[in-house]
Amino acid sequence: MPERPPDPRRPERSLPRLRAVSANARAAVVLTVRELLGVREAAPDALHDLPWLATDGITGTSDGINMPSPDALAYLQYTSGSTADPKGVMLTHRQLAANCRAIEATYRPTPDSVMVSWVPTFHDLGLVYGISMPVWSGFHCVSLAAADFARRPARWLQAIARYRGTHSIAPDTAYAIAAARVERQALDGLDLSSWQMALNGAEPVRRASEDAFIDAFAPHGFNPDAFSHSWGLSEATAKLTGEPAGERRQFLRLDGEALARHRVVDAAEGTERVIEVASCGRPAPGTELRIVDPESHRALPSDHIGEIWVRGPSVGLGYWDAPKATAETFGARTAAGDGPWLRTGDRGFLHDGRLFVAGRIKEILIVRGQNHYPQDLEASVAGTHPAIRPGGTVAFALDRGAGEQ
């Protein structure tokens, strides 16, 4: 299974998750690189019971290839564990191939396409979009370390210019960071005119982030219509919906007070609280979406907010060694008995066949009886002072005994 490597500087903070994942998956070997072999000796309990193999030190090749069955387990994709312990999603070769086929159908790469990605391969966005899809479609891929982007965001854009990248992927915050932190001298000679698809996914899309990126880099050849919004989750490999690159970005301006009551109402002139929600595109081929009341399991019509349920060829088999959680999440049925469906835990609505995601159900903050989506509060605070860095805000509730605050 792909998993984030331990931080050699802070092994005590990064090893607990790695140990938990290794124990759950019953791992047999740790595949790493020579640079990280020292972590095993420097940190206590650094999976000493497993052999560590540095793949960049292997010189020999095998005599043949053992071709797996399409329905054999390809890997376990462990969830982020933001609201619970991480769970390993069982994904087969057939499901990975179906997802690569869906990505290919939306973004239409050619043999001359070039993917440039710094998104880590332990994240489904980096693994599937950044590595698996180029291999599947047969085009070139340039990979950077996430630390390179974090230390100097200009390296990402310079790599796109240098290798004439046509496709690249990043979460929304990365576009905001690049717009704010790329140094002026790094812009000299920067040519982004080859960039055809700039996928924005893995977190809520904000128009302000994209507008800032466009303002900063359109003078250097970036095409605003290259932005493409996508939505998916580990339980369904990666991609479930997407907006083809080249189509104009879709945002709805909604009444924030109505949205807090789970109603979709266009913001009228003079509306005090306006929330812009980005389209995440249409379902991938073979993928079905339903918007469902999370309590009654009643299917809802368009322009009604509920939990997003999905089914299709990319949906995983379930959670590794967790039959109860698998039945609850992957075996849902509507009140009418239709199923099985995958419950995503995301709240959203369909409008003109496109999906708009409003937030995570478990993350909704209820203060004095009013629902608040944390990403909306974070965006509001982020725009109040120039000293607040992109991605530097977080909203959460505190239980003070008399209710959440």
Image (spheres, helix red, strand yellow):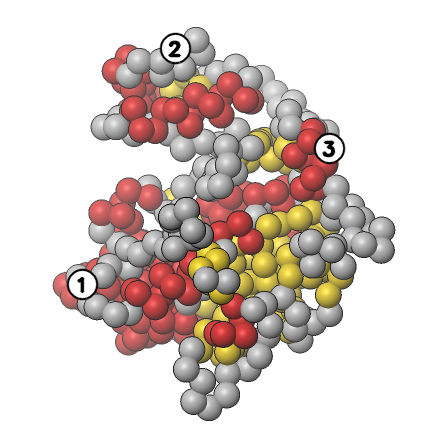
Between residue 325 and residue 261, name the one nearer to us. 261
Q: Separation of disc 2 and disc 3 at Cα?
A: 32 Å
Q: Residue at x 64, y 61 (%)?
A: 306
Do residues under tags 1 and 3 come within 8 Å of each other at their CB atoms?
no
Kind of residue at disc 1: Ala
Between residue 364 and residue 13, name the one nearer to us. 364
Mark 1 residue crowding within 10 angstroms, few (<14) / some (14–19) / many (20+)? few
Please give the label number shown on residue 387. Answer: 1
User: Where is mark 3, residue-wise?
Assistant: 71
Between residue 61 and residue 345, name the one nearer to us. 345
Do residues under tags 2 and 1 come within 8 Å of each other at their CB atoms?
no
Relative side of 302 to 140, left or right: right
Q: Residue at x 64, y 57 (%)?
A: 307
For residue 347, say whether it is visible.
yes
Q: SS class of the residue under badge 1?
A: loop
Q: SS class of the residue under badge 2?
A: loop
Please give the label number shown on residue 144. Answer: none
User: Where is mark 2, residue-wise?
Assistant: 48
Judged from this view, the residue extending furthest toward the right is 337
